Image: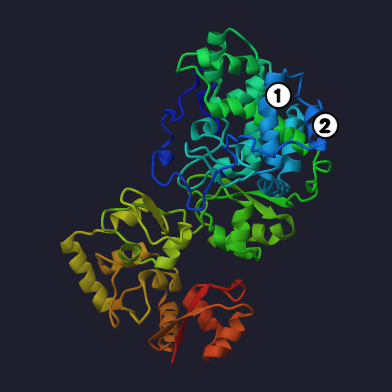
Amino acid sequence: MGLLIASLAAGCAPKTPQEAAPPVEEQVTENLVPDDAEALEPEIEAAPEVAPGEDLTQTEQAVLNQRFGLLFDLEQHESKEVELFFTYYNHKARKTMERWLERSQPYLPYVRRVFTKYGLPQDLVLLPFVESGYNVRAYSWAGAGGMWQFMRGTGRLYGLKSDWWIDERRDPYKATDAAARHLKDLYDKFGDWYLALAAYNAGEGKISRALKQANCDDFFELTEKNRKLSRRNRLKRETQHYVPKFIAISKIFQNLDTLGFEPVSWDMEYEITPVKVPGGTDLLALARAGGLSWKEFHDLNPAFRRQVSPPHMEATAYLPTDKADKMVAYLNEPGAQPYAGYIRYRVRSGDSWWRISRRYGVPINVLKSVNNTRSNTLRPGHYVMVPGHGSSKTVTASASPSSSSAAKTRAIAAQRGNYVVRSGDTLWSIAQSFNTTVSTLRKSNGLRSSRLKIGQKLYIPNSSSAATKQAVKEAEKVKAQLVQYKVRRGDNLYSISRKFGVKVSDLCHWNAISTKTTIYAGQKLKVYVQ
């Protein structure tokens, strides 16, 4: 399914188009499909046959014979395909149709407004049923994505960004606007909505070439002559079924009550406020500022592929209107964009989350979190994001100091050391405690790796002696035993502190959070117990 044209001028390419070279940030072929991608349901691509005893009732036959919307008078042979799909979605795939109807409710009002703005027929708001079953997370085997099933090249032509960080084909609002513009362009080209729909599926070039060879200007006539076309111009079964399937679903949607379906509700639209978020914004922290879990936030913002916004661009986030004020206030805080200096690390053979964690001093749970994955599997050649501060070049350059200069730096750091490593410490946690960076710690201590030993002395630069002494003093209050506590329903920072006999301020310090931070069931907190 999906849109296969590589350019509007040149027409469409085959099912796997050669796309123009993307910008530098997009020149990666790895991880193109997100971990949370959902395959198209089999009912999308089904080529059903009417089973014995599956005849239409009188009521269903009456609905099928109605004329409305885009439908014009169909010849008998033309309506057979429509009846096939009409029967399929009313009988065998009825539960699937019910699921699609329910899933469409948050988006239908917006799609209708956009299509009205562009002067498009209202019937076309039903096209995502044919494409994806109104599934914003759907991906086809060919790589088309989102509820409108844009291919990456076509999406880019209509302004949809698609790279390692974000896939705006899954943004139901931006993708809807892009789809409306694309459909309008196709209608302007062919002057017929059925041909425009066929071109939406197969590509403008494919339909143009097929019409020219068939010497006709009608979709149904084209399908009749399809067998006589050359292999290059012949329409695939998917395209031949596309328009009849659309007509069948349109008839069902226009008669839900009559056919016994639950009517869709037009007041289920999400109440959201779109806001621009700067590059490198901590999206998980943004969600928590509004009291949302990551799942709740991501359900509203499926375009984001990481828990961090793309560091190289401003992006759009959709916030619940009733919580937008708190979330916008967070965006205005100085620490809202801590990942602007990310490192994009290319996975090597033999790498693991543990090895990358040790190398950069970033806990495994943090690495998985910002990469929006739970998988333990890493594939050589893929990329993962490693959080960092400042320039990624600086971080990378500091990762491997020359052996001679590193030895001198280590000797000086050992003499000036103002912090003693304790159980559970990592460079990441120490950097967070002293408001510095992993890169700075490694460079200032001549460290070749991020491995630390209990009792090792580190020099913490760029912090006043008073602040350093206070941080060390607080750390010395904590004994070596670390407990990874899993937050339970009903827990809060105060109840957890009472449970372990520690201070709330210590809990906040150990986990780099504040007393105002929202904690949630399933979250893991570090607790150092006596």
Q: What label sits on residue 478 in the rendered view?
A: none
Residue visible at 73% across and 55% down in the picture: 321
Compared across the picture, whether 150 is left or right of 453 comes to right
Q: Which residue is mark 1?
A: 79
Q: Is residue 125 visible?
A: no
Instruction: Name the quadrant containing residue 258.
Output: top right
Task: Give the camera-side residue of 366 and 129.
Answer: 129
Q: Earlier in the sequence, mark 1 or mark 2?
A: 2
Q: Please, is residue 79 above or below residue 115 in the view?
A: above
Instruction: Name the quadrant containing residue 445.
Output: bottom left
Q: Which residue is mark 2?
A: 62
Whole-percent x, y for residue 442 in the image: 30, 66
The secondary structure type at the circle numbered 1 is: helix
Total tally of numbered discs in the picture: 2
Circle 2: residue type? Ala
Q: Please, is residue 227 above or below residue 266 in the view?
A: above
Whole-percent x, y for residue 181 in the image: 65, 28
